[in-house]
């Protein structure tokens, strides 16, 4: 392992330098633009959950058909994750995300002109491919600028993008739906994303190396006078995509993260895509009220993600599994109790939804974001994030048909009864990584 005592050639370690100033500016741009980009993807994804009830009424769609649209989207999303992960490591996250933003906006426009099940299914499946570029591309672009020793805390704040994103998306879609009709909830977000795609292409930096700056681990070690957390041969590894694929496919921690994420993403997408519909159908909320109430899930998730990231760095020394296990076990209790509590009243339902979001998003962010990037070792961070998220999307894909089918035949209480044992399974899987870090895995190798 190399240490921070070695300073890049020509740099005075005691004075502010041009590369330090440029690094700070690029990090701010990378953080802000990737945060906005991934939050922005939700504008063209989360809107469908708000539209399900009016679409079902206007076009006589069944719960099973609505679930099939979700499943088609998520199958495409899962497949696309592996492709986007490979392309992100090969061509950089900036290009992959920029193309994805434009394509998802186009698919929302196409969906808005649909007039029946098949006309909704096809563009939403293609939207799944477009959306799959977001996670591996954004995590790659972000992790290029933040070292592992600070990543849990920094990424804890950055990962609020996928809680704030759904909040903004739900508010926007609900407002447009109530005032201008269902098509406006697709056309409005599409136009916003077209504009942001241009800004992203113009302002987003590439990797430190393409910007003429030192590797992020060199920067972090030099700045804090600490030992580097990556080996020299990792920093300078040849850009070999097949080597990246082998690294991911033979990594026990990455497979464990992916399998844990299958069960966690099943729960998250069930709640993300069906909570407004559940409240409208089962609790008899008005469509707008159901959409606005569901926002509590994502708002509380912001706090869960930040807390989980900080705890993993400061309390567990950059180990991501312990806080994930603890929060998943608590989530098992919360999901088991939800249907009983939600029927007590609107305040009780709101608090229950917030608790679910807080406990779910913390481990979700650690597994799919921070830990995946850690074990990708920088070289394959996009592929590792894409692999974990793609494997997890199998659970997300199953959520569409399972929730639609079970709710229609056995009722909503049966749906929520599925979640608790899944949380326990995920916690048991993650517990096998309790003391595992990239350094311990390197030592074994």
Image (spheres, rainbow, N blue to C red):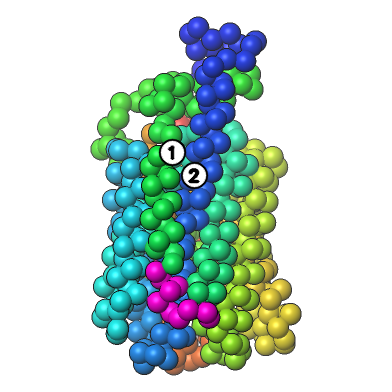
Label 2 and label 1: CA atoms lie apart by 6 Å
Q: Quadrant of the C terminus?
A: top left
Q: Secondary structure at mark 2?
A: helix
Look at 44% across and 59% down and name the residue there.
192
Residue found at the very far front of the displayed protein: 180
Q: Which residue is drawn at the image coordinates 44% and 38% (left, top)?
A: 203
- Looking at the image, is mark 2 or mark 1 earlier in the sequence? 2
Going by the image, does 380 lie left or right of 415? left
Q: Say few, some or many: other residues with alpha carbon within 10 Å of mark 1 (under 14 / 14 to 19 / 20 or more).
A: many
67 within the magenta span = no
Question: Which x, y percent locates residue 8?
Answer: 50, 12
Q: Nearer the viewer, residue 172 or 228?
A: 172
SS assignment at label 1: loop
Dominant secondary-structure state across the stretch colored magenta: helix
Q: Which mark is residue 33?
A: 2
Q: Quadrant of residue 72?
A: bottom left
Give the vertical position of 5 relative to 204 (above or below). above
For label 2, the crowd category at 10 Å Cα-Cα, with few meaning under 14, some 14 to 19 and many 20 or more, is: many
Quadrant position of residue 319: top right
**Residue 425 rendering spot, x and y as whole percentages:** 52, 65
Q: Which residue is mark 1?
A: 204
Point out the stretch of residues depicted in magenta: 177-187
| x then y, percent, for residue 6 | 54, 11
Residue displayed at 45% across by 81% down: 181
Q: Are marks 2 and 1 in contact (CB under 8 Å)?
A: yes
In this rendering, does residue 201 appear at all? yes
Res 374 label = none
Judge from the rendering whether residue 177 lies leftward or rightward of residue 323; answer left or right. left
Q: Is residue 365 visible?
A: no
């Amino acid at each position: 392992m190399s240490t921070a005592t070695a300073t890049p050639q020509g740099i005075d370690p005691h004075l502010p330098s041009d590369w330090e100033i440029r690094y700070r500016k690029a990090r701010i741009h990378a953080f802000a633009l990737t945060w906005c980009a991934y939050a922005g993807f939700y504008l063209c994804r989360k809107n469908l959950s708000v539209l399900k009830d009016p679409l079902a009424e206007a076009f006589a769609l069944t719960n099973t058909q609505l679930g099939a649209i979700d499943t088609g989207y998520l199958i495409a999303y899962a497949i696309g994750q592996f492709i986007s992960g490979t392309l992100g490591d090969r061509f950089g996250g900036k290009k992959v995300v920029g193309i994805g933003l434009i394509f998802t906006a186009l698919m929302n426009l196409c969906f808005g002109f649909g007039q029946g099940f098949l006309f909704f299914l096809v563009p939403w499946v293609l939207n799944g491919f477009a959306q799959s570029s977001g996670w591996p591309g954004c995590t790659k672009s972000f992790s290029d600028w933040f070292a592992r020793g600070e990543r849990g805390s920094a990424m804890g704040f950055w990962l609020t993008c996928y809680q704030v994103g759904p909040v903004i998306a739900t508010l926007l879609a609900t407002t447009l739906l109530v005032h201008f009709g269902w098509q406006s909830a697709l056309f409005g977000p599409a136009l916003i994303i077209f504009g942001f795609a241009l800004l992203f292409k113009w302002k987003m930096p590439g990797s430190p190396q393409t910007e003429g700056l030192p590797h992020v681990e060199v920067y972090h070690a030099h700045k804090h006078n600490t030992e580097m957390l990556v080996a020299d041969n990792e920093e300078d590894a040849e850009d070999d995509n097949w080597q990246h694929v082998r690294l991911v496919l033979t990594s026990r921690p990455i497979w464990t993260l992916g399998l844990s994420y299958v069960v966690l993403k099943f729960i998250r997408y069930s709640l993300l895509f069906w909570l407004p519909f559940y409240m409208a159908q089962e609790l008899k909320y008005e469509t707008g009220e159901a959409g606005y109430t569901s926002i509590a899930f994502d708002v509380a998730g912001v706090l869960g993600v930040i807390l989980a990231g900080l705890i993993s760095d400061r309390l567990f020394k950059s180990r991501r599994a312990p806080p994930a296990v603890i929060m998943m076990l608590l989530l098992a209790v919360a999901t088991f109790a939800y249907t009983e509590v939600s029927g007590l009243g609107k305040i009780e339902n709101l608090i229950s939804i917030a608790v679910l979001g807080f406990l779910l998003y913390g481990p979700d962010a650690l597994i799919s974001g921070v830990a995946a990037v850690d074990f990708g070792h920088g070289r394959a961070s996009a592929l590792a994030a894409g692999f974990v998220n793609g494997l997890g999307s199998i659970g997300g894909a199953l959520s569409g048909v399972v929730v639609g089918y079970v709710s229609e035949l056995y009722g909503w209480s049966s749906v929520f009864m599925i979640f608790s044992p899944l949380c326990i399974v995920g916690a048991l899987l993650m517990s096998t990584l309790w003391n595992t870090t990239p350094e311990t895995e390197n030592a074994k190798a």
